Amino acid sequence: MASIHGVTCTFIHGEIPSKKLRTRTWSIPGINGIGAQTLGYGEAKFELRAVLYATIGGNLGLQLIEARAWVGLIEAKQGTVGTIVGELATAPNCLITHVGVPVVTRAHPYGYRVEMTVAGEVR
C-alpha cells in the first residue's frame, strides 16, 4: 500500500523520484569552452498528489474525523526525511519541503476523498 513517511495513502499520483547525477558547469572569461564537475547522486525534486478515501465504518462523522486526522499527519511530515512508497516504486531519504492545502470532497457512497500535494527532493 502507498505511504508517505509511514502515513498510509489510498493512492499516490505522480512519479516516485530517484536520485539523479548532479553536475555543475562553469566558464572562465578569456578561455574557450566550459568546465564540468560531477558532484554525486541526489537532489531529485518531486511533486506528488497523495489521496485518501476515508471510509471507516460507513459513518460520515467518523469518516470526516479520519480525513482530518490524515491531513494533520501529512502536514506534520513537512520538513522531515523519510521513505515514500508507491504502487510501483520506493524512494528512501525523501525530504518533504512543502505540503499543499487539502481538498476534501464527498465521495458518495464511499465517504470522503482527501487530496494533498506533497513536494520535496530526494537526498
Image (cartoon, helix red, strand yellow):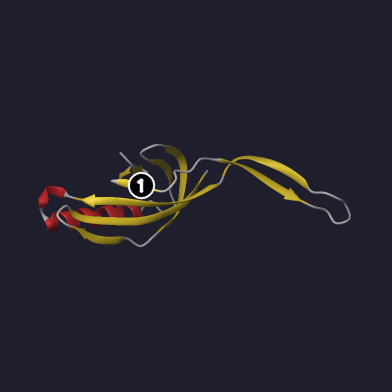
Q: Is residue 90 visible?
A: yes
- In the picture, measured across the screen, residue 25 lies left or right of residue 55, that is right
Q: Position of residue 60 (x, y in %)?
A: 13, 57
Q: Position of residue 12 (x, y in %)?
A: 36, 47
- In the picture, measured across the screen, residue 25 lies left or right of residue 79, that is right
Q: Is residue 9 visible?
A: no
Where does label 1 land, which residue? 12
Across the whole image, how many numbered discs are drawn on residues? 1
Crowd rating for badge 1 (residues with CA inside 10 Å; few <14, some 14–19, many 20+): many
* Between 78 and 108, the one nearer to me in the picture: 108
The answer to whether 74 is drawn above or below residue 90 in the figure is below
In the rendered image, the residue lying farthest to the front is 108
The answer to whether 2 is drawn above or below residue 31 in the figure is above
The answer to whether 34 is drawn above or below residue 18 in the figure is below
* x 67%, y 44%: residue: 23
The quadrant in which the N terminus is found is top left
* x 33%, y 41%: residue: 2
Q: Position of residue 68 (x, y in %)?
A: 24, 57
Q: Secondary structure at mark 1?
A: strand
- In the picture, measured across the screen, residue 51 lies left or right of residue 107, that is right
Q: Position of residue 97 (x, y in %)?
A: 46, 54
* Between 58 and 98, the one nearer to me in the picture: 58
